[in-house]
Image (cartoon, rainbow, N blue to C red):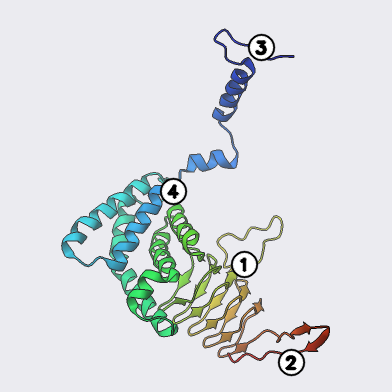
Amino acid sequence: MADRKTADGTDSRLAEATEAAIEALSASGDDALSKADAEGYPDWDEAVEWTERAKMLVLHQRDRAALRSEIPALGEGLLRLLARLQRPDGPEPDAVLAGFLERLPQVRTLLAEDVEAAFEGDPAAKSFGEILVAYPSIHAIAIYRLAHQLYRLRVRQLPRVMTEHAHSRTGIDINPGARIGRRFFIDHGTGVVIGETSEIGDRVRIYQGVTLGAFSPRRGQTIRDVKRHPTIEDDVTLYAGVTILGGDTVIGRGSVVGGNVWLTESVAPHSRVVAEAPRQLVEKRGKRRELKPLHWDI
């Protein structure tokens, strides 16, 4: 049967479908999307623009006249973002802004040490400028260190947007709640994941594909606000593809963990952990030749 037409020529089925969609989508509900709207959240694009502005300030800006105009503008932008996140039990925006500005010099000091650690840890680096402009880890760490200060000031959603922006640009996923010490270096970095309750000491070096993760909760198990991710003590090196899981797992200071190792138990200080060496099988022109196990000098 052909659809009936309204007087003005509009398809009646389309009109009915439009009205039904409006009625359903405008109805209040108790689902997760309705709760998210009620809670409020920052505009993604506005938060990203503010994040990049804050990052550029701590990494590059030293002109006093520029800082006198840039810091107030940065503060106004933060207050606008916080206005979307007002909750009765949340921190006062003015107190957050004051606390954040007070911590900017500390953030710059930490980032300067991170750049030094990258220069010392990567023989391919030719200059500090190269590291600052071309190393994705520095951008990810800079945004993490800014976001972490807001996290400590009890701002929750904005720090996550900041570090997810860094994740989308660099492939490095650092939760703003993680606690990371001085002179931190991520070499290459693609695929690195550092969970919320991870604790990382000073002078730690990690490579691409490293995961500091948590065990998946069992059905019905609540583990929010519980330490779920590992502790990495001072002077530890984690090579590519390492996976370390669990809030009780501690990698002792001075340890080296080789590539593709999977750890769910603690390791004593000054340990050397390697995966069992693989055996290579080569076939050529109908002949099969088995190679000896590989041995890594880590």
Q: Is residue 15 visible?
A: yes
Query: Circle 1 is placed at which residue position?
Result: 214
Q: In this rendering, which labeled residue sits more in front, label 4 or label 2?
A: 2
Residue at disc 3, secondary structure: loop
Amino acid type, mark 1: Ala
Find residue 4 and name its label. Answer: 3
Distance, label 2 to label 1, CA atoms, is: 36 Å
Residue at 50%, 40% (x, y): give it: 37
Find residue 185 and name its label. Answer: none
Tell me which label, 4 or 3, sits earlier in the chain: 3
Is disc 2 in contact with disc 1, using a CB cutoff of under 8 Å?
no
Residue at disc 2, secondary structure: loop
Amino acid type, mark 2: Lys
Near mark 1 (Cα within 10 A), the count class, few <14, some 14-19 or many ≥20, is many
Is disc 4 in contact with disc 2, using a CB cutoff of under 8 Å?
no
Tell me which label, 2 or 1, sits earlier in the chain: 1
In-front residue for pair 23/251? 23
Query: Circle 4 is placed at which residue position?
Result: 44
Query: Circle 2 is placed at which residue position?
Result: 292
Q: Residue furthest right?
A: 286
Q: In this rendering, which labeled residue sits more in front, label 4 or label 3?
A: 3
Q: Quadrant location of the C terminus?
A: bottom right
Tell me which label, 3 or 2, sits earlier in the chain: 3
- Where residue 220 sits in the image (x, y, percent)? 70, 55
Is disc 3 in contact with disc 2, using a CB cutoff of under 8 Å?
no
Q: In this rendering, which labeled residue sits more in front, label 1 or label 3?
A: 3
Distance, label 4 to label 1, CA atoms, is: 27 Å
Q: Residue furthest left?
A: 65
